[in-house]
Amino acid sequence: MTIVAYSYQRFSSLDQIGGDSLTRQSTLAESYARDHELELDNRLTIRDLGVSGYRGQNAVHGELGHFLTAVRNGRIAPGSYLLIESLDRLSRSNILQAQNLLTELILAKINVVSLVDNRTYSEASLTADPLALIFALIVFIRANEESSLKSFRAKQAWIRKRDSAGTQVMTSRVPDWLIVCKATGQIVARSERAEVLSTIFQLALDGRSPFEIADHLNARGVCRWRGSQPWTRPTVSTLLRNRRVTGVLPLYIATHDNGETSRRPIKLLADYFPRLIEPEAFLKVQALASTRRRGGNAAKLNVFANMLFCAGCGAPVRHHSYGEYGRAILACDGARILHGCNASGFDYDAFEIITKKQLSRWIHDDLPWHQVSDPNQHVFRAVQELSDLQSSLSPRSPGGAKRRAGATFYAEVAKLEDQIDDLIFNEHGFNAKAVKLTSKLAAYLDEEIYENTVRVKCNMLLRQLGARLVVDFDTGWVGLSHNKGFERSWSMEENP
């Protein structure tokens, strides 16, 4: 029976793609398979190009991870060979993770071959020579130490660049509407792109949607800055949300926890880039965009999407998936562009738990239904009209079947029902329609776990109620209001 071999090729930087690394690894694998009469499966050559093995990402999210899944599912036959240039191509992670990866492959009956030193790691070889495993561990330790040193040096170099960013350019990579001048070393605007950017924001300020702005640019033959494709709604939306147009540079630091890499914001640099859009205009565009949004995908992450505002500067407060230790945060738009606000981020999960319980209390405690008198008897007359109209549904009534099928009939019923809802109020000034909405909301808020559909419905109901949440980042107080003014406030320090 022919034994199949698979070649695993990896390098950590895409800059190496122009060198001989890939050719060298391929040649070694082909030569070994030929000399040992193995069938090299070229259809499943596994390549992680530009993927580092230092954090173990190649074994989690890379092609090596897919190979491991195929081994676990039995699609890779026991006794197969995995050919790698050296063990450090397999992993440069810490010794425990690297050893676990090699052990899993060996126990799955996969023969791992290190081509540069012609060593085979299998149950049979390690049983015959247990010290070979020590050699493998030494290779893993050395590889990890090399990567750790490179990572440390790169991090220190980046810290030096970051600390000097106020006086010199950190990197030549800048937003598409800017360029680093070779003569002066300064970041300057590309005049023609700056004009396009100004047009985009002016159209947004005039109330045009991203879709309409994209159509406007395409109709006038304005070229995209990347590629040859036409302007699209997502492209325009991304530009309208990019705070770098105000000149600010956000700085982050990478964190690595449990094999996952996340970035944490550390500070903002004002006027690092040329300011092409004034902060006031930028914030106004964000506010206009909020009025058009209907929750949707945003509500899946943030139940209170498009109804949160900063008590300090009045700017919208938004959900961001990155924060300290990789946790989601709420951050003020004004603070995120250093525009007269220094509000710090707030942990979103804690905010949602407490606010959800406070909203539930507000509905159950503060909105009991109390029908008030109707001195002008508008409600009585509307109910009587509705009753008369609905009685016409009777098949025995003249023309009943014809009216029953007509759209006008249902429009008349809906109109009368709305009139009744608008005319009946409880003691807190909520009409019947609002009370119906709050009763639906209460049912959703009582759920222990939010599914995406439930989160979107909660967001929709809150916005239909005109809910507005004002967050005071300094004191930790949250105020709930609707079209009748503030109704409730609470501290985020309170025990919910």
Image (cartoon, rainbow, N blue to C red):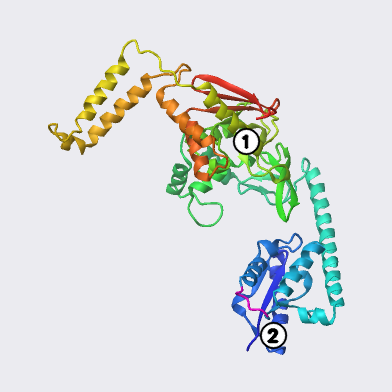
Sequence order check, earlier mark of 2 and 1: 2
Camera-nearest residue between 334 and 366: 366
Camera-nearest residue between 290 and 278: 290
* Three-letter amino acid code at the position of disc 1: Ile
Camera-nearest residue between 383 and 482: 383
Q: Is the stretch drawn in magenta largely helix, strand or loop? A: loop
Q: Which label number is shown at residue 353?
A: 1
Left or right: 378, with 496 as reference point: left
Specify the quadrant of the image occupied by residue 332.
top right
Residue in the picture at 51% in, 36% down: 444
Residue in the picture at 73% in, 74% down: 107
- Secondary structure beneath dot 1 equals helix
Q: Nearer the viewer, mark 2 or mark 1?
A: 1
Tell whether position 77 is magenta. Answer: yes
Figure disc tally? 2
Q: Seen from this angle, which residue lies furthest top?
A: 375
Q: Position of residue 417 (x, y in %)?
A: 32, 27
Q: Seen from this angle, which residue lies furthest left?
A: 398
Q: Which label number is shown at residue 409?
A: none
Labelled pair 2, 1 in contact (Cβ < 8 Å): no
- Secondary structure beneath dot 2 equals helix
* Three-letter amino acid code at the position of disc 2: Ala
Q: Position of residue 350 (x, y in %)?
A: 66, 36
Left or right: 457, with 9 as reference point: left
Label 2, label 1: how far apart the Cα atoms are: 58 Å
Residue at mark 2: 33
Residue segment shown in magenta: 74-78
> Which corner quadrant holds the C terminus?
top right
